Image (cartoon, helix red, strand yellow):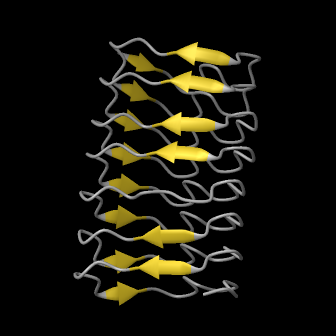
């Protein structure tokens, strides 16, 4: 089953428990909603582009273990999002997935992750530390740009390319 494009976009829904039959949250599913809490099912495989974009009351998210992809801008502008847990099967994080999530201080990237899109953590001004797993070979453009409190970054053994502006305006590194 699927929760379709913009299904709860700009709605007043504050708390949601998604059915364990749902496998996909399509684009903009909960964007610009009043969502505070989302209980996502273990059956979930994919979270589409901008699914939680500007859900400005969302404080935490636990991405289930089977989710393989998080779309671009998925959680961008979730201005009070503090706690993020990413499931172990996640392989792809879309462009700007967590851009402008200024309250996130730490995030653990799963060992299976292979792709981190451009600007994935752009302007995450609260982020202090990030470890890239061994599965990452390339870090895309602007991934950590404007992370002004970032103090420590660790790379896996297989890193081959660090693209442009990755650490632009990260004065504490």
In this picture, residue 3 sits left or right of residue 33: left
Quadrant of the drawing holding the N terminus: top left
Q: Position of residue 105 (x, y in %)?
A: 62, 59
Of 172 and 43, the residue lying toward us: 172
Of 5 and 45, the residue lying toward us: 45
In this picture, residue 17 sits left or right of residue 36: left
| Residue at the image position 41 percent from the left and 70 percent from the top | 131
The number of numbered discs placed on residues in the rendered structure image is 0
In this picture, residue 16 sits left or right of residue 162: right
| Residue at the image position 75 percent from the left and 38 percent from the top | 56
Q: Position of residue 10 (x, y in %)?
A: 75, 25
Against 170, residue 112 (above or below) is above
Of 166 and 84, the residue lying toward us: 84
User: Looking at the rendering, which quadrant does residue 25 occupy?
Assistant: top left
Q: Position of residue 125 (x, y in %)?
A: 71, 67
| Residue at the image position 69 percent from the left and 63 percent from the top | 126
Quadrant of the drawing holding the C terminus: bottom right
User: Looking at the rendering, which quadrant does residue 162 occupy?
Assistant: bottom left
Against 8, residue 131 (above or below) is below
Q: Position of residue 92 (x, y in %)?
A: 35, 55
Against 50, residue 141 (above or below) is below
In this picture, residue 45 sits left or right of residue 51: left
């Amino acid at each position: 089953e699927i929760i379709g494009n913009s299904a709860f976009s700009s709605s007043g829904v504050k708390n949601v428990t998604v059915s364990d039959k749902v496998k996909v949250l399509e684009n903009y599913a909960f964007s610009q909603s009043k969502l505070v809490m989302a209980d996502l099912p273990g059956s979930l495989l994919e979270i589409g582009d901008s699914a939680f974009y500007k859900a400005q009351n969302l404080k935490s998210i636990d991405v289930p273990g089977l989710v393989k992809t998080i779309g671009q801008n998925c959680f961008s502008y979730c201005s009070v999002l503090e706690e993020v847990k990413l499931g172990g099967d996640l392989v792809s994080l879309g462009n700007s997935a967590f851009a402008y999530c200024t309250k996130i201080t730490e995030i653990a990237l799963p060992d299976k992750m292979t792709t981190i899109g451009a600007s994935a953590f752009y302007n995450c001004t609260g982020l202090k530390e990030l470890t890239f797993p061994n599965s990452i070979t390339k870090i895309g453009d602007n991934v950590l740009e404007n992370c002004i409190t970032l103090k420590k970054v660790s790379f896996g053994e297989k890193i081959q390319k660090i693209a442009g502006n990755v650490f632009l305006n990260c004065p504490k590194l």
